[in-house]
Amino acid sequence: MPLAGTVLGFVGKPDGVRVEAFDGTTAGSTDAPIRLRVTSPRAMAYLLRAPGELGLARAYVSGAVEIEGDMHDALAVMTGAAAEVAQKPRSATKTLRALGTTLLRAAFTRAPRPEQEARLRGRRHSKERDARAIAHHYDVSNRFYELILGPSMAYTCAVFPREDASLDEAQAEKFDLVCRKLGLRPGMRLLDVGCGWGGMVMHAARHYGVTGLGVTLSRAQAEWASKAIAEEGLADRAEVRHLDYRDAPGENYDAVSSIGLTEHIGKAQLPAYFATLLGKLRPGGRLLNHAIMRTTTTQRSIFTRGFINRYVFPDGELHGVGHVVAVMQNSGFEVRHEENLREHYARTLAGWCANLDANWDEAVAEVGAPIARVWRLYMAGSQLAFEQHRLELHQVLGVKPDAAGDSAMPLRPDWAS
């Protein structure tokens, strides 16, 4: 069987995909919008040893396979078909035997895993291992993130107030929505855990007159944020420190925001996480927890063999919103509001993908082709997952009641007015 036809079989023979192989063979329609170019025999080793998502990712990240065309559309037509093939390894092996001795030998040769694949050591979710996991993803290059995220430098789900809102407008709306849900007012103290590049503390200080402290495990983020805070003239009201949230100083904060941190907290650590945040708040203080979540509480929280865990968010764990709400309640929070922003995250990711494509050459020059390929693959795949309701994004608002049970909450939510 021609090599190109075999590769097309490994990704499920979807319509709209053409394969062009290094041996000169081709398969699929000549006018297909998606083209897979197989540049090396190593591609077959990746596809055979890890059929489906991970094998294709390794082949693409290493350059053994090139994907030309819109990555979101490519994944939309390939992922489902490839998943079916992954369930039939005997059939795939049988197909490979038709390749001939030379290519068969190459296919069964162990190809080195791309060096971008994370290899963490130590106890999962210990402070030391968490720091390495965060550095793997966030300490890539601040300039690289500027190319993807744009001026907002916000790396979490935006909130689009209008159909025609820009990504930067939507990120500002997200920060403002969090501020309103937290009931921020001048003179209040805010703690932002997992603060990224400081967007939340800067927005809250600038527009709501609070004193904000952000903490992040990424040294690169903390350095960028500190410089931005100084340039904005906010150093008297906003600060970002390179710290684990468990080591954040002080207590009796009026509000705590956690935007995109819970994904890095293990399921077993959630009770301690929410207990820590509860302990940081004064009575009547609020927590806004904003996180990617599973669509049910019965799914596994972590998939150790998947592409995302190996290349993007090592040790990341996602939970169902019901589980998160239950742990918050059991930790002492009164849950007052919950909102699913799934469609907003699909649109956010589409914006990031467009930014990466528009700045592709500079991104590759900044971090190298393999890392740029990882981000191109994961962001397009994540966009598809939100669109297809395989992931959700929830904001859960909790309050710490005082000893008499008073929540200090308004009778009706006032953040929409």
Image: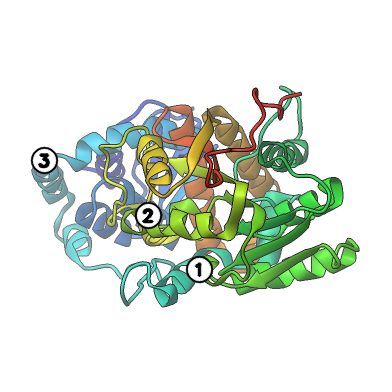
Q: Residue tagged by mark 2?
A: 271
Cα distance in 3D space between marks 2 and 3: 45 Å
Q: Are marks 2 and 1 in contact (CB under 8 Å)?
A: no
Q: Is residue 363 shown left or right of residue 260?
A: right
Query: Percent position (x, y) of residue 339?
Result: 54, 29
| Nearer-N-terminus badge (2/1) | 1
Secondary structure beneath label 2: helix
| Nearer-N-terminus badge (1/3) | 3
Q: Is residue 290 above or below residue 392?
A: below
Task: Please say whether residue 27 is visible from this viewpoint.
Answer: no
Label 1 Cα crowd, 10 Å radius (few <14 / some 14-19 / many 20+): few
Q: Nearer the viewer, mark 2 or mark 3?
A: 2
Q: Residue tagged by mark 3?
A: 91
Q: Quadrant of the N terminus?
A: top left
Which amino acid type corresponds to the residue marked 3 in the rendered image?
A: Ser
Secondary structure beneath label 1: helix
Q: Residue tagged by mark 1?
A: 246
| Nearer-N-terminus badge (2/3) | 3
Q: Is residue 252 above or below residue 294?
A: below
Q: Quadrant of residue 168?
A: top right
Query: Percent position (x, y) of residue 213?
Result: 70, 63
Q: Nearer the viewer, mark 1 or mark 3?
A: 1
Which amino acid type corresponds to the residue marked 1 in the rendered image?
A: Arg
Q: How is the image coloured?
A: rainbow
Task: Please say whether residue 216 is visible from this viewpoint.
Answer: yes
Query: Percent position (x, y) of residue 388?
Result: 42, 27
Q: Is residue 52 shown left or right of residue 347?
A: left
Q: Is residue 244 shown left or right of residue 166?
A: left
